[in-house]
Each structure stands twice: as C-alpha cells, then as structure tokens.
Image (cartoon, rainbow, N blue to C red):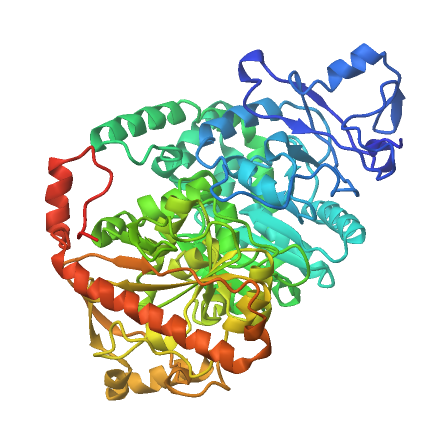
Amino acid sequence: MTSLVKAFPVSLPFLRIPESSKHHFHVKVRSLDSGANSTSTGFSSDSVVVNGRSFTRGKDEVESLFDGERFMRLSSVREKNRGKGAISEDMDVLWDDGYGTKTVKDYLIASKDMIRPDGGPPRWFCPVECGEPLKDSPILLFLPGTDGVGLGLTLHHKALGKVFEVRCLHIPVYDRTPFQGLVKFVEDTLKLEHASAPNKPIYLVGDSFGGCLALAVAARNPQIDLVVVLVNPATSFARSQIQPLLPALEAMPNEFHSLVPYLLSGIMGNPLKMAMVGLEDRLPPRAKIEQLSGKLTSLLGYLSVLSEIIPKETLVWKLKLIQTGSSYANSRLHAVKAEVLLLASGQDSMLPSKNEAQRLKKGLQNCQVRYFKDNGHTLLLEEGLSLLTIIKGVGKYRRSRKVDFVRDYVPPSKSEFERVFFRDGRFMQAATGTVMLSTLQDGSIVKGLAGVPTQGPVLLVGYHMLMGIELQSLVGEYLKQKNILLRGIAHPAIFGGRFESSSSEFNFQDWIKVMGGVPVAASNFFKLLSSKSHVLLYPGGAREALHYKGEAHKLIWPEQQEFVRMAAKFGATIVPFGGVGEDDLVELVLDYKDLMNIPILNNYVRDIARSGPRVRDEAKGEVANQQLFIPGLLPKVPGRMYFLFGKPIETTGREDILRNREEAHQLYLQIKSDVQTNIDYLLKKREKDPYRSVFDRMVFRALYPSLQEVPTFDL
C-alpha cells in the first residue's frame, strides 16, 4: 500500500497528549489509496515517510506512534472508497447529535495540545469525534479563523460527522505560509476531491479569516460545485476595530502579550454565550444561574491559553495575513459562482459583520444570510444553533448536484426536537394544551394516537388552520407519542428564499424544513410514499391556511382528487383528521379582501401574489385562487387545540381506485366528509371541556404537578 505521505509529501509531527487530557480530542489518519488493501487507518508497520525521508521502525514502535490514546496525528487525508464501512442511510429520528456536550473549554484544552511547535506546514486532520458518515456523504473542509488551530467546529463535530466527511485545516503556530500559498493548498485539495467524486458538492466552511480563504478558492474554481458557508467573514477587515491596533501590537513588549487575551476576550466573542453551551434549560432559575456562574468562572480561567495559541509574532503575522486575504477576496467577489450561506452575528465587536452581510448579499450572485443578533464574533463556539441545523434549515444539504428533499433529508436530532418544542416552543405548548384523539377500527374514539397505523406508508389528510398555526403542536405531539416524523407537503414559497434579507433570522420556515417539510410536487409525493413515510397533506393548501373572515374551520378543497390514486398505487393507509382551535388563539382582523382595500398595501400584496410560485394553475374552483399574503392577526387569551384522527381507510387491493376515476372521486368525497365530521365533533365537544382556558390548565398543573396531562372532555 502506498503511504499517504509518499503520494502527498507533508511533515508529520507526533504531538504527545498529557494523560489528563486524553479524552478531550483525537484525530485520525487514513489511507490515500482505494485499492483492496487500503482499509488500514495507519501506515506501513516498517516504514514511515516524513518530508521525503524514510524511517524504518520496529512494529511496536510504530504502533506506539499511531496509538490514538497517546498521540495526535495530523495529516493530509483522502479516501476514495468512502461507501465502505459507512453507517446505514436510515437514520433514526431524535438521534444524538452531541450538541451541547462539548464547550469552548474543550476547544481551549484541545488547542493547547495541538499548538506545540512542530515546524510543519499547513495540513488537514479528521476529528475522530466525527465518526463515519452516511454513505455518499459530501466532504466538508473547515477553514479556521485567526487562531489557525482548526478546532473551531469542536461543538459541531459529532453532528456534522454524521452527514459529512469532515476535514479541518490546521495552520501551525509558527507557520508563515503566505495567503496565496494557503489558497493553493486548499485549491489542490479541492481539485483532488472533485476529481474523486465529480457529481458531489464540496462544502467550504470559512470562519472569519477562513471566510476570505473560502471566497478566494471559490472565485478561482467556478467550475467546481461548491457550497460556501461564511461565518462572520473577515472581508470587512478594512473597516474593523482591529486594524488600527496592528502598529500598537508590533510595538508592544513581549512581556505584556500575556494580557492580550484578556483584552481581546470581550471583542473576540460573547463569554456569556460561550458559557451557556450545554446549560440545562429545564433547571429552576436559581440552579441555572449557579450552573452558568460556574461555567463562566471555569471558562475565564482558560483564557490564558489564547496567548499560547497566538503568540505576539504570530498575531501580528495573522493580522497582516487577514489584511491581504480580505483585499484578495474582495477583488474577486464577482467571480464567485458557488452557493453561499452567510452567518452574521449582531454583537460582533471585532468585525462589522451585520453591515458586511448586507454588502456581500448584494455583491455575490447566490447568497443567503442568517442573522444571529445576540451572538459575538466566535459564533461557532457560542450557544445557539448547531451548524448542521442551520445548513438543513436553509435547504443547503445535498449529496448530488441538485437537492433531493426526500433522499437527502436528515431527520431531526434530539437537541433539535427539544429546542423547537420545549425551549423556543415552550409558550406555544402551554398556550395550546393540545388534545390528540384517534379512532379505532371498531369506530370508537380514544385518547392518544393508538388508532393511527404505525406501519407506513400512511397519508394524513386534514384541515389547514389559519397560517398553519397547528403545525408545531401536530408534528410535535405526533413525534412524541409515536416516535414517527410527519413529512409535510408544504408550499414551495417556503423553500424559495425570495423574501429573505441580510437580517433574516433563523425562523419558522427554516424549522419547517428541519422538521421534514417537502415542497409540493408529484415527484416528492411519489418518493415519500414509496419510502413508506407518514405524509401530512392539506388539500386546501394556501387558500385554506390563508382563509378569509368567517371561514374558520371551513374546508376549501379542489373539485377533483389529487392524491387518492397515488395513495392507492402504494397501498397507503389514508387517515382523515380534523383540527380546531385557531379561533381560540388568534383573531383575524385583516384578510385578503381588507388588505386589497388599503391603498398603501394593495400593490405590495399584488407583487407578492404575482411573484410567488403557482402550485395549481390547472385547478378549478375556489382553491385555485391561492393568493399569498400576511393577514392581520390579534392574539387572544389562549384556549385549546384539539385533533381527531378518523378511522383509517385502507387502499391496499383497491384496484378499482386505480382503474376507475369515478371510484377514486367517491373515495375523495368520503375523505372530505370524514374530515368535516371530525371538525364538527371537536367543535361540539370542546364546549364541555372544563380545561379549555389556559388559566384553568395553569390552576390544574399547580394543584397536580405530578400529572403529565391535563384532562379534557369525556369521550
């Protein structure tokens, strides 16, 4: 087997890890070749090549050098047969993404281990924490910020490693490779990976200075399919508060350099947000404050490591490198053809990142922005969202030239579920007090979802409440009770990004994509049913979700069936369901007709409707009039949300539906009638619910805190 370094000569240092820190961080070496004997993760036991020189060693000695428990190994990495040994593509919902288990303290400890002088050039390494990715996963190259260590993704290694082949660039402390040299180094790796898998995208994640590097490489390689993720890119260095400090840093005596980390800590990132990583959100307020205080104190004790990561001469060199890289990247923005996702912090005291996001969005051909108003410069090391969650939420994860919303979908992790349904959605959960009912085969109605089949494919067909206000409760409760994710058929406007700006935060539309939303299309519907998914379908679509005054709980469906024959083709079980409660949460004060009568707003509404994607141009009837607009709503004292899933309808063996359109239409009318019957049942029964009001539910929980559920009406 040809050794990696023989084909790609680099320096290979072996940095010993102190016994007390062995568990914090490991990296691994892989073979370059793809031959039959290339599955080893190390080198030949009798020869090691370093900088062109061959060293013969005994077997025991070489095994000691590559012992992952005792040594770190940094190397250039490439592996052609990536499919072998990969985990199954069928990922479980609520999988463990590890987010919150690592903190900035782990980053500082691991960085201290990696920065020992070795005299080597820049190189790639693979964090062992990333593990083996899914088969056919794309490669992700991480380009670090000013520190150059390459551990900026420490908080995200486990999550990213599930669906990416992660490679991190390490620039040794005393390396003085010029910017053009770094561009050439990354570019060579890019071309090598592209030649190995030309139909897969390559992800470049550039943090701060790494953002300049990523843009420079992208501009020089427009023919390669790239997805560039920029995190507070240093392209704004000329307007930053750091540049004027360069002369002062050069003149500063070495003995005062140890104070620099403490002076810069306030502008490099948000220490409070760093300490909040992994904080147990469900703790009582006092316990949470105590835990946060302990984390913050522990973190401040490690700040001195920064002076070792970036000694004075290295800091001066890096600032000059950023200056060069910023000018280089800015002069070539017009040549960047890649998809760009820009993450900008609102509290970045080092760079004017928010203004830079506005500038780059205008200057780049294909750029989306997500704004994080409470974070500082070191966004990837602070409390917030997982980087993988962000990539999924903006629809940027793909394994081929075009995104496949079914094949490329990554199910929500446990941390994502807890955030959207228990942290950010805590108020919604309390306000709705959701009641889930289902119907057994004998027609009896029971609490919970026992009447809904577990074995797919299952098609849930129901009523779309105002503004889709029911989605969080419906999807969350379904996942919690059945451990099954609903794949919702959603309006394509959610996926277009047409109305996004440079200050767009991670929002409800992004969470719809994270939690399984799929743009409405016959091909996507076909793929979901063929993969035996549980599919959520609203025949009324946008017209029903954006209904007018007086149309609450009214079905506004197309005249002809659009889904029955497809369901029968795959033998899917159809479950009609009804939901009520929108009128207990919000009051509709301005509908489409009202907005069109307001001179200032009507032109804006027309522009939205004209530019929005059309889903049913050939549909007839009222549902074809799908005008997109934002209605005027007023919140109400919350009542309660109720769902009733009707008796399942089997389509297996129903060849008559496939052959006879009239039979299919009759089944369609039956489903519509069942949905309306479910709605009428809930509207009548909720009047007898003693805990319909949020105040009554609050009193009940105060009196009976040990009970998990608040009772409802008698069935």
Residue 389 in view in this figure: yes
At horizontal 17% and vertical 58% (from top left) the residue drawn is 639
Name the one closer to the observer, 480 or 493: 480
Q: Nearer the viewer, residue 611 or 149?
A: 611
Name above or below for residue 29 compared with residue 235: above
Which residue sits at x=80%, y=53%? 195
Query: Is 185 in front, or is 682?
Result: 682
Task: Where is residue 619? Give x, y as percent.
Answer: 47, 85
Q: Quadrant of the N terminus?
A: top right
Q: Say whether residue 533 is left or right of residue 596.
A: right
* Residue 699 location (% of width, % of height): 10, 43
Vertical placement of residue 114 versus 611, above or below: above
Q: How many marks?
A: 0
Residue drawn at the location 20% of the way across and 32% of the way down = 706
Q: Residue 222, position in %: x, y?
A: 71, 63
Taking the spot 30% from the left edge, 77% from the top edge, the residue there is 547
Q: Residue furthest front?
A: 442
Residue 626 picture quarter: bottom left
Residue 634, position in %: x, y? 18, 68
The residue closer to the viewer here, 559 or 669, is 669
